[in-house]
Amino acid sequence: MKIGILGAGQLGRMLALAGYPLGLDFAFLDPATEACAAPLGQHLRADYLDEAALQRFCAGIDLATYEFENVPEHAAAFVAARVPLMPGPEALAAGQDRLSEKRLFESLDIPVPRFCAVDSRADLDAATAYTGLPAVLKTRRMGYDGKGQMVLRAAADFDAAWAQLGSQPLIVEAFVAFEREVSCLAVRGRDGGARFYPLVENVHCDGILRTARPLPKDPLQALGERHARAVLERLDYVGVLAFEFFAVGDALLANEIAPRVHNSGHWSIEGAECSQFENHLRAICGLPLGSTRLRGASAMLNFIGTAPATQALAALDGVHVHLYGKTPKPQRKIGHATVTAADQRSLDARLRRVQRLIDRCASA
């Protein structure tokens, strides 16, 4: 079976690495000249809206998926009309627009921060009167890794924020003084059966995920699963879905969904009995879903901009290195390490050793 993937970044690369042991082959459509997944399959280098390229892409595959949510809706619809596309275009559309996303959550009685659409400078004043300050002004589309958003702490911030972001549809959200950022990684098969990974605690810096750690027996696990299941069923979703939340006391406030495999689930390659990447492929291919149980204690650390020497990392017990074949650039994810151990105390010690190597590399 040949799987077509819209996008050929690191997530597509890791999907292919998980799929080859299952006997799957891969084709990628991506306009990038240095698409890091390209060595792992056929790479059709073309714009996502190039219909002739999309036609060639569909002609050579059995089914399709995507590795990032900013695939144009027209491209997704074009592919879905010719081969099975999973998750479906409705899920892709839901994850592309923060306003539609929040309204979806509200319709499912999933708590969200106060929010309001902003289409003009006057709207910004009215929206912040509703949400209160501080608040976060965000683009409705295309923002990721902290891009496309600004924190508003006082009315004096409004003009500068509008000058930077005001040329596109926006949304204002109340600033949440959260205790933790967590994500619920879920997978749903073609038969409607679903499995859930342990809730993951995420730590960000400058809007970019730095560490992700699965939490066995987290008290909010059942609530996260309930919210994620509601979205899966509403969208008739097939594949892996990541649902990001702000944890406040015993409540989870919905932040956003990613209708794809997700950075906060990379630890699952070594840390779970079946990784998020293999489970996504199992789901879209109609195979039985794999176990989401932990193999032990584990966590992931991202390499941002640069990475420690592989030899130094490989010398540490329980450290598994994943480099994406990307040119190092500031603020760019170029790889990650999964750290595993028999228990949480041993894991903490190993994480400190890896973090020291990362810090030395960053300061060199």
Image (cartoon, helix red, strand yellow):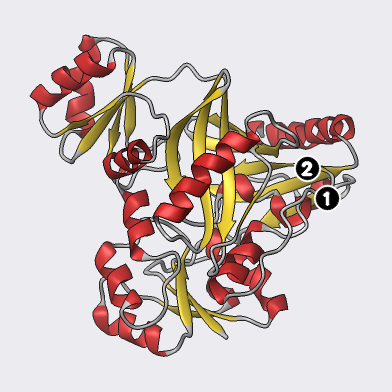
Give the camera-side residue of 345 and 244: 244
At 9% across and 23% down in the image, what residue appears? 122
Return the residue nearer the eye: 34 or 135. 135
Q: Position of residue 87 (x, y in %)?
A: 44, 64
Q: Is residue 160 left or right of residue 40?
A: left
**Point 39% across, 83% down: residue:** 57
Q: Are marks 2 and 1 in contact (CB under 8 Å)?
A: yes
What residue is disc 1 on?
295
Point out residue 13 in the picture as x, y percentages from the top left corner.
58, 66
Tell me if I can see residue 225 in this picture: yes
Label 2 belongs to which residue? 298
Tally the numbered discs.
Answer: 2
Where is residue 147? Give x, y as percent. Answer: 37, 38
Dot 1, how many residues are within 10 Å of its Cα: few (below 14), some (14-19), or many (20+)?
some
Q: Nearer the viewer, residue 263 or 221?
A: 221
**Is residue 345 placed above or below 239 in the rendered structure?**
above
Q: Amino acid at mark 1?
A: Arg
Residue type marked 2: Ser
Viewed as shown, does residue 344 lie left or right of 153?
right
Q: In the rendered image, which quarter is residue 108 located in?
A: top left
As drawn, the residue found furthest toward the bottom would be: 59
2 vs 1, front mark: 1
- Please state if 363 lies on the left or on the right of 259 as rendered: right
- Position in image of residue 159 (x %, y %): 17, 20
Kind of element beneath mark 1: loop
Q: Quick one: label 2, few (<14), some, or many (20+) residues within 10 Å?
A: many
